[in-house]
Image (tube, rainbow, N blue to C red):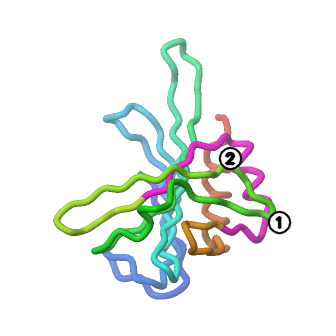
Amino acid sequence: MKTMMALLGALTLPTLTAQAAGIFTDGFDTALNRRVIEWRGAPSPEGIVFSVIASQFKTSAGNATTDFRTQLSTFGDKVRFHGCSASRWEMNNQIYLPLKGQYRMAGLDERYGEYFVAQPTRQDLEWVAMNTRVHYRLCRLRETLSAEDLQGLRWVLQAAEAD
């Protein structure tokens, strides 16, 4: 599996420090029989992680297809966004519905993972990648997608181009 790490500062393996901008991976998942291309960003100042995943596989008819998924996630010892049913994205001060992520939560031993998951099209993501300032809202929290996360999105789109 090919892995590339983008760094803003020091990186201590195997744990990413707060200075790391994110991790880009491109590999084949033999269990699912598909190529998986992923960008997983570093946590924002509010602890939100942006991820984008492209999953490429062949259908039973032999046609190649790519599915995309975006995710905003956070982990901690308390639930922060239980009252939110979806994330809201804005570009150029306009709400952008294709990235509206549905809320999911998982808990284990008093640790909670909260996720806002969307399944946009390639064209939706290309539109996002062309912008320089992209904002999202989770309840009352408003954040700006980092330049590193936008670059990670561009890397996923470039790697997922048709062979």
Q: Secondary structure at mark 2?
A: helix
Residue in view at x 64 percent, y 70 percent: 145
Residue 84 circle label: none
The magenta stretch is: 115-135
Would you name the residue on which mark 1 appears?
92
Q: Could you say where residue 43 lies in the image, as x and y percent from the top left? A: 47, 75
Q: Residue at x 68, y 42 (%)?
A: 122
Where on the picture, by quarter, is residue 95? bottom right
Specify whether 150 is left or right of 47.
right
Q: To which residue does mark 2 refer? A: 98
Please determine whether, in this image, residue 35 is positioned above or below residue 11. Answer: above
* Image coordinates for residue 24, horizontal then vertical, percent: 51, 61
Earlier along the polypeptide chain: callout 1 or callout 2?
A: 1
Under mark 1, the amino acid is Asn
123 drawn magenta: yes
Which quarter shows the C terminus? top right
Q: Residue at x 67, y 73 (%)?
A: 147
Which of the two residues, 8 or 46, is positioned nearer the viewer here? Answer: 46
Looking at the rendered structure, the kind of residue marked 2 is: Pro
Q: Position of residue 123 (x, y in %)?
A: 74, 43
Residue 74: x and y, percent?
Answer: 41, 68
Mark 2 surroundings within 10 Å by alpha-carbon count, few (fewer than 14), some (14 through 19), many (20 or more): some
Question: Against 2, is 80 above or below?
Answer: below
Secondary structure under tag 1 reads loop
In 3D space, how far apart are the residues under numbered discs 1 and 2 (Cα atoms)? 15 Å
Residue 94 is inside the magenta segment: no
Give the farthest residue toward the top: 61
Which residue of the protein is positioned furthest toward the bottom in this rendering? 10
Q: Residue furthest right?
A: 92
